[in-house]
Image: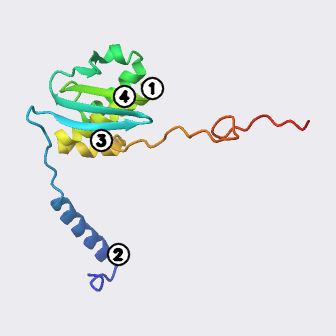
Amino acid sequence: MSDDIKSLDDLKDAVAESAVVVEETIKREPVRDALGRSYATGKRKDAVARVWIKPGSGKVTVNGKELNKYFARPVLQMILAQPFSVAGVTGEFDVMATVKGGGLSGQAGAVKHGISKALQLYEPSLRAPLKAAGFLTRDARVVERKKYGKAKARKSFQFSKR
């Protein structure tokens, strides 16, 4: 193949042909259980969420409570709505999630990550917009541990000459 390429145009053609071959080999199938649901886990900070989605009216249940009861702050509710608006399926899926660990902000991020992963498993065509928005990537930022001899992770105690 490399001996065929003499110019940049030849290289473009070769890359385009290989991209078509890759797209044809990766054919994603929907992943659903016997009840017609898709399941995924989402993580953010110390929070871990288990999320099930199924077609419905847009009802969201987190740890047995309604969305606006569990996540009272509108910002957190907006975070959970982002994957649906990006994918263009607002109000089409019911969500049932259980979440443990971390604080409310981390839990909202974990549920958002789980919803995004479950959506792309339920309908593989939704993968492109969710991936472009960065919702399928786990946000790996966590709190740094406290070191010995330090007041916090990096803050030193106040220096005193005498």
Q: Position of residue 147 (x, y in %)?
A: 63, 42
Q: CA distance from mark 4 to mark 2?
A: 53 Å
Rendered residue at 33%/45% (across/down): 132
Label 3: how many Cα within 10 Å (few below 14, some 14–19, many 20+): many
Question: Are the two marked residues, 3 and 1, in contact with CB atoms closer than 8 angstroms?
Answer: no
Separation of residues labelled 2 and 1 (CA atoms):
53 Å
Q: Which residue in the protein does label 3 denote? A: 130
Residue named by callout 1? 103
Between circles 4 and 1, the one closer to the viewer is 4
- Marks 2 and 1 in Cβ contact (< 8 Å): no
Q: Is residue 25 left or right of 13 when viewed as pictured?
A: left
Up-down relation of residue 5 to residue 45 (above or below) = below
Amino acid at the residue labelled 1: Gly
The label shown at residue 8 is 2
Please name the amino acid that badge 3 sits on: Leu
Q: Can residue 7 be seen by looking at this rendering?
A: yes
Name the N-terminal-most of marks 4 and 3: 4
* Residue receiving disc 4: 100
Residue at left offset 48%, top offset 41%: 141
The foreground one among 37 and 17 is 37
